[in-house]
């Protein structure tokens, strides 16, 4: 290979894919002629081991991350100030182990051989949830910051920032459900959805001609309003449960 290359594998501790699939991917990576870093896990490293990621970013010209959704990974690194340069992401939520290995060969020129393999871990215990902001989509409405009860965000009319990600409560992606722009991502969410980092799709219908299209648009709008109400009710329930769990935890410590 003409470029110094590495593969970074996120050994995800949030169980977004099965242990069997993670092991299959790792066994395949060990048979590739490339530097391989097994990180336990990428979310924790982005918060607590920034120097390690920055050093990898400077050492290698070609970096391939085997992790979750590219939108989630890119915004997570950006949010945490990781200077990683150019890199590609292979989504292990959607690709099989064989598809990942095939793409390494056909798209990135990685040959079979024996990997220069390193396993690295951090002591940081990252909770199952913490939010990442997609700055390109964020409209600075501040709804997420006002909805959150746990001091995760700071907000003014010009800036929205995640300042205390580890204060985010498990099983409470409620703030993300309230976001009208789908700008809040939870990389450690097991589902395959926009909230976990998938690319938002368009649901708009053109109304520039014909009564039929206008009727369809009205029905679609009504349906979206109903769904939005259901999402808000779900978000409120998730927030209520998270607050109740916090109160129980405080009482146990007293």
Image: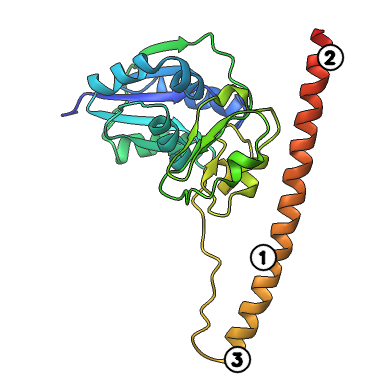
Residue 251, label in figure: 2
Query: As displayed, is residue 114 above or below residue 141?
Result: above
Which of these two is toward me, 97 or 188? Answer: 188
At x 62%, y 41%, the residue is 146
The answer to whether one can see residue 192 in this image is no
Please indicate whether residue 119 sits to the left or right of residue 125 in the image. left
Q: Looking at the picture, how far across and down is residue 75, in whole percent?
A: 43, 37
Which of these two is toward me, 23 or 185? Answer: 185
Query: As displayed, is residue 226 above or below residue 43?
Result: below
Q: Looking at the picture, how far across and down is residue 158, in whole percent?
A: 42, 44
Which of these two is toward me, 29 or 42? Answer: 42
Could you tell which of marks 2 and 1 lies nearer the N-terminus?
Answer: 1
What residue does disc 1 label? 224
Question: Helix, strand or loop at disc 3?
Answer: helix
Question: Helix, strand or loop at disc 2?
Answer: helix
Which image quarter: residue 35? top left
Could you classify mark 3 by the number of other residues whose Cα lies within 10 Å: few (under 14), some (14-19), or many (20 or more)? Answer: few
In the image, which is nearer the foreground, mark 2 or mark 1? 2
The answer to whether one can see residue 169 in this image is yes
Cα separation, mark 3 vs mark 2, equals 60 Å
At x 51%, y 27%, the residue is 163
At x 60%, y 47%, the residue is 143
Could you tell which of marks 3 and 2 lies nearer the N-terminus?
Answer: 3
Could you tell which of marks 1 and 3 lies nearer the N-terminus?
Answer: 3
What residue does disc 3 label? 211
């Amino acid at each position: 290979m003409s470029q110094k290359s590495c593969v970074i594998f996120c050994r995800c501790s949030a169980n977004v894919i099965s242990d069997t699939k993670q092991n299959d991917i790792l066994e395949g990576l060990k048979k590739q002629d490339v530097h391989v870093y097994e990180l336990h896990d990428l979310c924790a490293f982005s918060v607590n081991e920034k120097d390690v990621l920055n050093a990898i970013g400077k050492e290698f010209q070609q970096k391939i991350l085997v992790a979750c959704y590219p939108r989630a990974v890119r915004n997570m690194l950006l949010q945490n100030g990781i200077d990683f340069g150019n890199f590609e992401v292979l989504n292990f939520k959607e690709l099989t182990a064989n598809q990942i290995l095939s793409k390494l060969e056909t798209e990135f020129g990685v040959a079979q051989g024996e990997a220069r393999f390193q396993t690295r871990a951090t002591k940081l215990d990252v909770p199952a949830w913490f939010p990442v902001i997609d700055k390109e989509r964020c409209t600075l409405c501040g709804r997420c910051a006002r909805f959150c009860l746990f001091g995760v965000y700071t907000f003014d009319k010009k800036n929205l920032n995640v300042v205390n990600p580890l204060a985010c409560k498990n099983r409470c992606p409620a703030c993300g459900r309230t976001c009208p722009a789908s700008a809040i991502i939870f990389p450690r969410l097991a589902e395959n959805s926009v909230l976990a980092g998938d690319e938002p799709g368009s649901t708009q219908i053109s109304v520039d001609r014909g009564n039929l299209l206008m009727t369809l648009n009205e029905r679609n709008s009504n349906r979206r309003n109903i769904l939005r109400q259901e999402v808000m009710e779900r978000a409120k329930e998730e927030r209520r449960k998270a607050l109740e769990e916090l109160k129980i935890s405080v009482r146990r410590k007293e």
